[in-house]
């Protein structure tokens, strides 16, 4: 937002839909006549919606809008990082902190390309006019906004019809998603160039021979219409990140739009894909002490929980996996409780905390205790968030050299647990910090 020199007030305040109407900054902005863009019950108290602001912000650019139910932040970040590293002076705005962006979650360039994480929540992306649209996958994610999966598809149909030129990226996502979502979306895109990607050779761009590498990520063979064209190596783990990288490759090829130069383009981007280290709160390492590695992830939907647990299994195949999960919103937990229970079954031990309500109130029909009881296997228990650290410290200190991965999951304040746990383990075990093997960027001491 820009500031008026005389009054020192901003021209506008842009807020998330999760921010309530009685937020003190919103109330003050309204009292002094500063427009508030977005927010809860937006039409009732805002001057104009967040989608209008995003449309104005990206007007005049070649907008590459990265959408989908899952993977938007990582795909948009990976794409922007690769383009920037290839010398494209783009602008990018992502809804997460990216350690490799000097601007935190933005890149400011003077070129014509603009990479934007395009959010479907409250129809925010319907104010955009994309040059290229990336759809990573479709799922019933925001159950408080969309009645069912068909409503999600209908909204994405509207989004794809906003493409202003000739290119659209449509991701099949995976074998199961291809039949479910790829075909219905294709029908709304007649007249556009559609590029598919996935894990089978029926897609234009596909990954074969996916295998773990020594960096904890994945290696795979990149194929174009089933023909091997390059070997790709990623530092970020999980099949979901293989799919994210395929989206980046397909988008870069479409953006440069020169079929004769495909091999040269791929040769120019494979190294940058290899150097991408990920996004904050996406399998982010908090620290290591003795035999315990602590990671944190934003996963708050069953598909995301399943994906990050799979990534942890890939990176640490022989270590015990202890998952601490904080459900995010009562409506999502009520609608998807059985799916969450199924996704958590791939851990070795599960701890569930109370629900992070965000924009909702507790109506008393379901909570963390009920979810913990629904996890048939492995051992699962409900522990209030304020007691989690002490309970985990007690358990880990009994056998501190046992190889354990603690993985905290959720979109709420669960993110505070990892750093507190690391601090308490160091204190209780009385281990000198210079004797503890650590990796990371130092966010939590030796992070």
Image: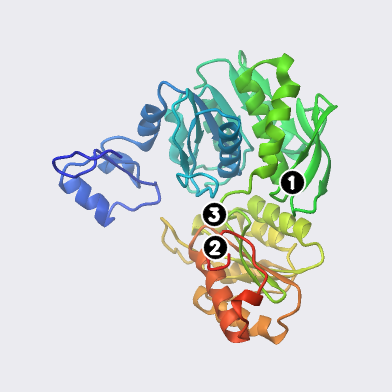
Q: Is residue 124 left or right of residue 268?
A: left
Q: Residues within 10 Å of mark 3 (few under 14, many from 20)?
A: some
Determine the image quadrant of residue 308: bottom right
Q: Earlier in the sequence, mark 1 or mark 2?
A: 1
Q: Earlier in the sequence, mark 1 or mark 3?
A: 1
| Residue at image coords 38%, 30% | 57
State the residue lying farthest toward the front.
434
Cα–Cα gap, marks 1 and 2: 27 Å
Q: Residues within 10 Å of mark 1 (few under 14, many from 20)?
A: many
Residue 286 in percent (x, y) is at: 59, 65
- Mark 3 falls on what kind of element? helix
| Residue at image coords 62%, 79% | 392
Q: Is residue 365 visible?
A: no
| Residue at image coords 21%, 47% | 29
Q: Which mark is residue 239?
A: 1
Q: What residue is pinned by disc 2? A: 442
Query: In front: mark 2 or mark 3?
Result: 2
Query: In front: mark 1 or mark 3?
Result: 1
Looking at the image, residue 209 lies above or below residue 284: above
Query: In front: mark 1 or mark 2?
Result: 2
Q: Which mark is residue 395?
A: none
Q: Front-most of 60 and 290? A: 290
Q: What residue is pinned by disc 3? A: 332
Cα–Cα gap, marks 1 and 3: 25 Å
Pointer 1 and pointer 3: residues touching (CB < 8 Å)?
Answer: no
Residue 268 in percent (x, y) is at: 69, 29
Q: Is residue 374 left or right of residue 410?
A: right
């Amino acid at each position: 937002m820009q500031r008026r020199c005389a009054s020192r007030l901003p021209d506008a305040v842009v807020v998330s839909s999760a921010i309530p109407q009685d937020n003190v900054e919103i109330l003050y902005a309204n009292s002094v006549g500063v427009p508030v863009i977005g927010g809860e019950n937006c039409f009732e108290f805002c001057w104009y919606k967040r989608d209008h602001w995003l449309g104005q912000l990206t007007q005049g650019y070649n907008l590459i809008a990265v959408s989908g139910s899952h993977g938007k932040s990582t795909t948009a970040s990976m794409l922007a990082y690769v383009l920037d590293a290839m010398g494209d002076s783009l602008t990018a705005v992502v809804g997460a902190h990216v350690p490799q962006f000097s601007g935190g979650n933005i890149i400011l360039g003077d070129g014509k390309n603009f990479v934007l994480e395009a959010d479907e929540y409250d129809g925010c992306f319907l104010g955009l006019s994309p040059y290229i649209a990336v759809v990573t996958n479709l799922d019933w994610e925001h159950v408080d906004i969309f009645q069912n999966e068909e409503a999600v598809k209908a909204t994405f149909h509207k989004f794809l019809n906003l493409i202003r030129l000739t290119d659209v990226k449509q991701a099949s996502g995976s074998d199961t998603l291809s039949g479910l979502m790829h075909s219905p979306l294709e029908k709304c895109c007649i007249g556009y160039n559609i590029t598919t990607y996935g894990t089978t050779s029926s897609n234009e761009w596909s990954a074969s021979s996916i295998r773990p590498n020594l960096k904890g990520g994945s290696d795979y063979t990149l194929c174009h219409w089933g023909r091997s064209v390059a070997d790709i190596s990623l530092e970020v783990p999980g099949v979901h990140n293989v799919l994210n990288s395929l989206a980046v490759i397909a988008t870069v090829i479409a953006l440069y739009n020169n079929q004769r130069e495909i091999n040269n383009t791929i040769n120019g981007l494979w190294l940058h894909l290899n150097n991408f280290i990920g996004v904050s709160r996406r399998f982010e390492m908090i620290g290591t002490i003795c035999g315990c590695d602590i990671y944190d992830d934003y996963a708050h939907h069953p598909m995301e929980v399943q994906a990050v647990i799979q990534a942890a299994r890939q990176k640490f195949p022989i270590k015990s996996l202890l998952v601490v999960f904080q459900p995010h919103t009562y409506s999502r937990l009520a609608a998807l409780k059985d799916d969450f229970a199924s996704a958590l079954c791939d851990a070795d031990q599960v701890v569930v905390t109370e629900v992070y309500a965000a924009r909702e109130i507790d109506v008393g029909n379901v909570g963390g205790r009920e979810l913990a009881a629904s996890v048939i296997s492995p051992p699962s228990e409900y522990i209030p968030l304020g007691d989690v650290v002490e309970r985990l410290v007690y358990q880990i200190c009994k056998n501190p050299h046992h190889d354990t991965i603690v993985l905290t999951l959720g979109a709420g304040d669960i993110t505070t647990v990892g750093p507190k746990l690391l601090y308490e383990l160091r204190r209780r075990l009385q281990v000198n910090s210079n004797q503890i093997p650590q990796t990371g960027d130092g966010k939590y001491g030796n992070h």
